Image (cartoon, rainbow, N blue to C red):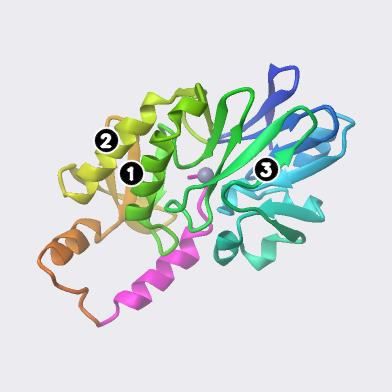
Amino acid sequence: MECRIIRIDDQTWRLEEEGVRFFLLTGSRSALLIDSGMQVHNAKKLAEGLTALPLSLLNTHADRDHIGSNAEFDAVYMSPAELVNYPLAKKASDIIPIRDGSSIDLGGRRLEIIEIPGHTPGSIAVLDVERRVLFSGDTVQDGSIFLFGPMRNIPAFYHSLKRLEGMTGRFDLIYPSHGSFPVKKELISRLISQTAKLERGELAASEAAFMGIPLKRYEADAAVFLCDADHGEKTERSAQGGQRPSGNSGADDKEKSGKGTEGEAG
Ligand SMILES: [Zn+2]
């Protein structure tokens, strides 16, 4: 599996696979991988080719396209809220819990953790404090944002974006896991307004599918939102104060979740 390694500065690299990227950061004392790839299973080895410093791993979240090389590590920094989304088959590592406001010091390079649930329950962003860069995972990006399946929560996604918008005085650039690189922080406000439109039913939907799962695709100008096939119907029902019909809707969700974890990227 090809993985391109691109140097951003003396202490920062991005590792680009088809459709997904992850990052290597170094300080004076230690190094950190932010995510470990999708199809590559040797991210540790790749990183050790770039730095001799002791290396740790952090996951922005545990979707399949971010944990490809986790088994190479004994431990991983992760939000405890993400454990519900961390497949047992993929992990050979202990969890080092990180929470909102936690910091990791690589030696002259302080990283601060910001919890941004929504895309997944334990999604986090990493603020590279002195460099004024935000590593945003899948939450702030201009590619396809996965908002389907049982791990996603669109209202939480919206509120996490609002929170990041309130912190834009602390960073100048955003390094996302998908889509364009880098992106400007103005993207956050655009995603907020379009997520609000999505929830108000104001975006046009088209039918789509991912790994055999039927989806609704909303082409917003900031990004593409991929939602559950019944997304608009749910909105309508809740607007009317109604509930989802009982029947087999729970079984549908289970099937989606099983297949959804096999996804390629997002
Ligand atoms: Zn992703």
- Above or below for 148 versus 6: below
Q: What residue does disc 1 label?
A: 225
Residue 247 position within the rendered picture, expressed as x and y whole percent measured from the top left:
25, 82
Say which of marks 3 and 1 sits in front: 3
Residue 99 position within the rendered picture, expressed as x and y whole percent measured from the top left:
60, 53
Which comes before the other along the chain, label 1 or label 2?
A: 2
Q: What element does badge 2 sit on?
A: loop
**Magenta residues (range):** 247-266
**Badge number at residue 220:** 2
Say which of marks 2 and 3 sits in front: 3
Do the residues under discs 1 and 2 have CB atoms within 8 angstroms?
yes
Q: Is residue 219 visible?
A: no
State the residue at coordinates (13%, 62%).
239
Task: Identify which amino acid the numbered label 1 is placed on.
Answer: Phe
State the residue at coordinates (85%, 32%).
29
Residue 249 magenta = yes
| Viewer-closest of 41 and 94 | 94
Label 3: few (<14), some (14–19) or many (≥20) C-alpha neighbours in 10 Å: some
State the residue at coordinates (55%, 62%).
81
Q: Is 148 left or right of 131, judged from the image as shown?
A: left
Total labels: the figure holds: 3
Residue 216 position within the rendered picture, expressed as x and y whole percent measured from the top left:
27, 51
Residue 81 magenta = no
Task: Identify which amino acid the numbered label 2 is placed on.
Answer: Ala
Q: What residue does disc 3 label?
A: 103
